[in-house]
């Protein structure tokens, strides 16, 4: 076993259970099927890793609410070694391609989020030469409230999922990448200011696409591609145009179409739930009641 660990040099979170090769116990939670990002929740005993490097950028977060509020240890990033205090909520950033190792002096709970480097280039292409985007390493000695909130929301999404899961994850990863570009890169992007929202033609194309594909799990990337802008700009311009995020708007469209089907069709409630893109009848009923104050059956009878 020791010989196998010493041979580990490259860690690729695109591969199944990749982190099992450097930690004593498997992750207790892993995301599934998220494009260009991967989340894991760990609960580990005292351990130390051999030196390795990653194909993806990796963020690590001390778990908020953990009974062990401090889990000190040592980390080596690109040849620089530092003793970390690791208070709950502290964030480490391990850029892709740099050498890395760490040790934990006490049992600890923590999360890791791996991000494809190409995602930073795709989101940042509007503001900076993609070849100049360099994520800076950061030791786990300070907190970042925004990154903590992204970790927390993604953890919940990995646990429960639900309707619009891909769209929610896409929105979060885009917001996270913009935050990284602004605060943790060697070259800071010059962010453009947009005040007029989407053009009427573009807005109509996007709305028509959404209404024609409500049954599908719509993704932010494909909506942004219709508008021919980056996902980050699409999020901002869409909200400026409508006063709601794409996720909120799609939910509203699903509820409106469901109302028509409840009034005008002979479909069962379960069939309507499927036809308008809800994952199941229970989720449809819950969202419908939250929006209108009555269940689909009560609406239909009224």
Image (cartoon, rainbow, N blue to C red):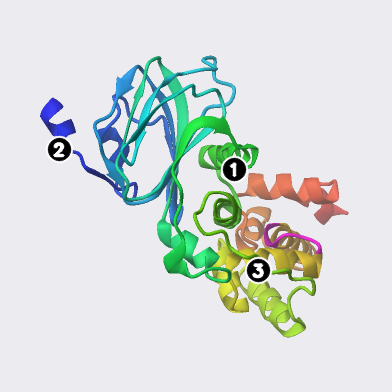
Residue drawn at the location 21% of the way across and 42% of the way down? 9
Q: Earlier in the sequence, mark 2 or mark 3?
A: 2
Residue drawn at the location 52% of the way across and 59% of the way down? 187
- Residue 27: name its quadrant: top left
Using residue 247 as the reference point, say whether residue 124 is left or right of it. left
Q: Earlier in the sequence, mark 1 or mark 2?
A: 2
* Above or below: residue 162 compared with residue 245: above
Q: Which residue is identified by label 2?
A: 7
Q: Nearer the viewer, residue 235 or 136?
A: 136
Quarter of the picture holding the C terminus: bottom right
Using residue 152 as the reference point, say whether residue 207 is left or right of it. right
Q: Nearer the viewer, residue 205 or 174?
A: 174
Q: Which residue is identified by label 3?
A: 234
Looking at the magenta stretch, what is its main secondary structure? loop
Residue density around tag 3, few if under 14, some if 14–19, many if 20 or more, within 10 Å: many
Q: Is residue 80 magenta?
A: no
- Residue 213: name its quadrant: bottom right
In the image, residue 47 lies at what x, y percent? 31, 21
Using residue 19 as the reference point, say whether residue 271 is left or right of it. right
Residue drawn at the location 57% of the way across and 57% of the way down? 174
Q: Secondary structure at mark 3?
A: helix
Q: Are marks 1 and 2 in contact (CB under 8 Å)?
A: no
Which label lies toward us, 2 or 3?
A: 2
Residue extending furthest toward the bottom: 201
- Residue 126: name its quadrant: bottom right
Quarter of the picture holding the N terminus: top left
For the record, the magenta segment spans 243-247
Marker disc for residue 41: none
Q: Which residue is identified by label 1?
A: 150
Q: Are marks 1 and 3 in contact (CB under 8 Å)?
A: no
């Amino acid at each position: 076993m020791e010989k196998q660990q010493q041979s580990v040099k490259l860690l690729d979170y695109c591969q199944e259970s990749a982190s099992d090769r450097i930690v004593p116990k498997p992750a207790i939670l892993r995301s599934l099927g998220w494009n260009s990002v991967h989340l894991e929740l760990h609960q580990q005993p005292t351990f130390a890793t051999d030196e390795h490097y990653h194909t993806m950028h990796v963020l690590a977060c001390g778990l908020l609410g953990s009974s062990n509020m401090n889990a000190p240890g040592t980390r080596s990033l690109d040849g620089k070694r530092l003793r970390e205090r690791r208070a709950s909520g502290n964030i480490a950033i391990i850029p892709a391609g740099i050498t890395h190792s760490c040790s934990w002096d006490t049992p600890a709970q923590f999360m890791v989020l791996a991000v494809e480097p190409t995602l930073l280039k795709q989101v940042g292409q509007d503001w900076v030469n993609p070849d100049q985007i360099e994520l800076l390493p950061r030791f786990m000695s300070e907190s970042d409230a925004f990154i903590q909130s992204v970790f927390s929301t993604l953890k919940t999404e990995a646990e429960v999922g639900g309707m619009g899961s891909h769209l929610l994850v896409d929105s979060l990863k885009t917001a996270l990448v913009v935050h990284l570009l602004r605060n943790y890169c060697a070259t800071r992007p010059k962010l453009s200011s947009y005040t007029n929202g989407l053009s009427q033609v573009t807005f109509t194309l996007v709305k028509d696409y959404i209404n024609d594909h409500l049954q599908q799990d719509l993704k932010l990337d494909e909506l942004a591609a219709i508008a021919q802008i980056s996902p980050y700009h699409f999020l901002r311009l869409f909200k400026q145009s409508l006063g709601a995020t794409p996720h909120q708007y799609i939910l509203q469209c699903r509820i409106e179409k469901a109302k028509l089907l409840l009034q005008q069709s002979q479909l069962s409630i379960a069939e309507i739930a499927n036809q308008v893109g809800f994952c199941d009848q229970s989720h449809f009923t819950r969202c419908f009641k939250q929006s209108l104050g009555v269940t689909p059956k009560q609406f239909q009878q009224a």
